[in-house]
Structures are given as structure tokens and as C-alpha cells.
Image: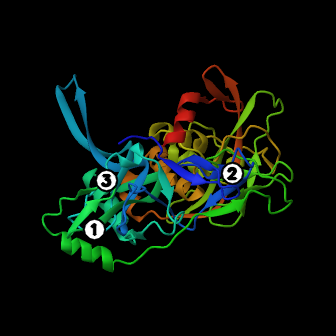
Amino acid sequence: MNGSNFQIEQQCPQCGAPIILDEADRILSCKFCRTRVYLAAEDIFRFYIPPAEGLSETIYFIPYWRIKGLSYTIKEKDMNRERQNSLFSYSISSTIRTIDISNKYFDINFLSLDSKLLPHSLGLRPQAMKLKFMGSNESEGKFLKFSPTLRDNFINDYQTRTGGIHKEIFIGETASVIYSPVYCANNRVYDALLKKPLDLQKRDVEIEQTLISATDEKWHVEFLPLLCPDCGADLPGEKDALIVFCDNCHTAWNPSNKNFIRVKYCAWRETKDDNITYLPFWQLKVKIAGFPLETYADLIKVANLPKAPAEVWTKTPFYFFAPAFKLNPALFLRWCRQLTSAPPPNDLIADFPVKKIHPVTLPVNEALESSLLTLVSLTADKRNIAELLPSLNFTLEDSSLVLHPFKVSTGELVHTKLGFPMDMNALNMGTYL
């Protein structure tokens, strides 16, 4: 598996000029007519691999799930502790149970039809060929309806294979469907790219009937003009941004689901704004059923933080924090821990205009998944949290973006308020996750 994004061929919806997009791109910019639109879908994006030229037969497009992201496994492990007493010449050994969090990056594709004969995977084809959005050519062929349950089954099987005793958590998970073309001729089913018959164990006629009778899928990508719903000004943004900020009326918008939804945000203002880049983090107010974590004073007790008791902490609401952008798994969790364990800032300014905002590439629902990881990693009593894990239920009560100031240094960005460094290479590599 590799972390490279696929490329998609798309025509400009205004002038028809050819444009090459990366898989993660959400903003289409045409250098010919200057059109800028947001690519939106109600659920997931669907792409297809174009068939070879010169085919007159009906093309059937076979659906494959493509899933990539960060994977964390929470499981129990035993640790042996041995105590020795040299005076009385004896030793006592005991076994204590603790929690271990392992992580990895994953990128996989698999067949989204209930068939054991069709190829199970696309292999390297999506990396080697440029894809197109489904619906960009209505006469291309028949697109078979994919199965959402096969995706859920895969995730459950993945948890079993990786030994997730308690929990398998996916963060920054990007799911899409990629269609691969086939056609039927002379009682055989052919690969429409290589024009060679598939090895279907002499059951081609059976597969052909399945293709003919399968439900046809209809879908197309939506193009949303990047204009602020409040003031009508152009909305700037990097090509992979999920949230766009208006420089005119200082609002933030999420256009992902075919309409613009306003997003609350505030900035931890840096008075010296020169050479400052603001990184976005999700501030999450989360209700945990049966677990006392309402104030920062509660966190001090749960995590055994080295802070003196103070009345102010009992009045300070507790928030989980998570990067609103993608990082490698270990670094992502480290930033969740660092910002969640630090006292929440009390001098935030709502809707404050700032320059140089790093693009938001992680949606709030994915950030919420990190709350359990952060809680487990911060909790001092690992045995107690291990017992509570199966019953913990997290409910998001409120969320907002907080823009944190970072000063550009050699090879890294340094948080101007907390002093935490962010490696620039790790930040840039997040684009490919």
C-alpha cells in the first residue's frame, strides 16, 4: 500500500478545458477562464477507469471500495512486575494489565460486489491511469450499484485481523468507489482495459447474467460556486480545503454536502502577526456517559497532571482538541494529547481575520473519533479505563475551529504560545494521507 493520491481528468464546467485533479482536491480552478468551483457530493465520490478505445460492446463498470486513512488499535497487554527484597532474600512477581495503542497508515481497495469470481482488487491500476468522475459521460456504460455493507464487513474483519481486542479506530478515513470496466463477447467476460478474457473458472455466462440484471447506479459530482453566502465575495482556499474562509466578512463555511454550512471559528491571536502561520485545530465539547470529565479540574485528576489545585480549573470547561488536518498516526495522537492536556486558552477572539491559514483537511466527525484515543492515552489509571472501554459512549455537544499561531523557523513551525514544534515535512506529507 502507498499513500499517493490518484489523479482525475475533469473538464472545466464553464469552458470545457481539461483539468487534472488529485484525489483529495475539493476545489477546481481553471487557469483558462478563471472559474473556481467546489466539488461536492452527498455521501462519497465515485470514479471510474476509462475503458480502452475502439470497443463497440456494452461496457459494465464493476465497483470497488477504496479506503485509506489512519488506523489505531487499542488493546490490553500484560506487564510483569517483580519486587525483590535483598534483606530477607525473597522476590514477589505480579502481572498487571495495561493498555497499548498501536497505529498504522492503511490504503486498500476491494471488490464491492458479492462475487468470488471477479477480481478481488484493482491492484495498481488507479495509480497507473487517470480516473474520471462517474457521470461525466452518460453514454460510457452501465455502472453497477455498490454494496455499503461490504465496507462495514471489511472494517470488522480488519479489526479481527489486527487484534483489536477493545477498539479499532479509523481517523481521516477517505472512502470512495472506483469502477473498473469489463465487457461481454463470445460468451466470455473481458477486461475492457487489456481486451483479454477474465479467468472466471468457465462461469462467464453466469457472470454475464449477473452484469445484465444488476441495478444501475446513477451519480454525478456537484459544482458549487465559491461565493460567500453572507456577503457574496469570492471564497479563497487551497485545492484540498474542506472549510473555506471569507476574507471580506470573516466567516467560515463548510460546502461539502451540496450546500454551505457556517462553521464557528476563533483565533488565538498573535500580536506580532509577521511570519505567522495559523494551524487549525478542532475544539470538541464531548459528553462521555458515565465518565466524570466536565471541567479541566476533572482532567487533572484523570490524567494526574502536575498542576496545583486551583478554583479556576473547576470553572474551566474541558475540551478535547484534535488537528483539523492530516498527520502521520503517531504525530496526530501526540498533538491531540498536547493540546488537550494544556489549559484551554481564555483569550480567543471569534471570527478574527488572520492571514496564512493552513487548510482544514480533516472533518469534525473524524476528529471526534480521536477523543477515545486521547482519553485512553492521557488516563493515568490504565486498568480502570480498560474495564470501562466497552461501555464508553462519546456524544459531540459542540465544536468549533481554533486557529493556533505558529512562527516559521528552520524546518519547523513553533507554537508561539505553547512552544510546541511542528515539523514542516510532516505537515506537508499529510497531504498524501
As helix, strand or loop, the secondary structure at mark 3 comes to loop
Q: Residues within 10 Å of mark 2 (few under 14, many from 20)?
A: many
Q: Label 3 amino acid?
A: Gly
Residue in the picture at 45% in, 65% down: 140
**Whether residue 272 is situated above or below residue 160 in the rendered picture:** above
Mark 1 or mark 3, earlier in chain:
3
User: Helix, strand or loop at disc 1?
Assistant: strand
- Would you call the spot at circle 3 few (<14 residues within 10 Å), some (14-19), or many (20 or more)? some
**Residue annotated with mark 3:** 164
Label 3 vs label 2: CA separation?
Answer: 31 Å
Could you tell me if the residues under marks 3 and 2 are in contact, i.e. CB atoms within 8 Å? no
State whether residue 253 appears in this view.
yes
Q: Secondary structure at mark 2?
A: strand
**Which is closer to the viewer, label 2 or label 1?**
1
Badge number at residue 184 = 1
In the picture, measured across the screen, residue 222 lies left or right of residue 7, that is right
Q: CA distance from mark 1 to mark 3?
A: 43 Å
Residue highlighted by disc 2: 401
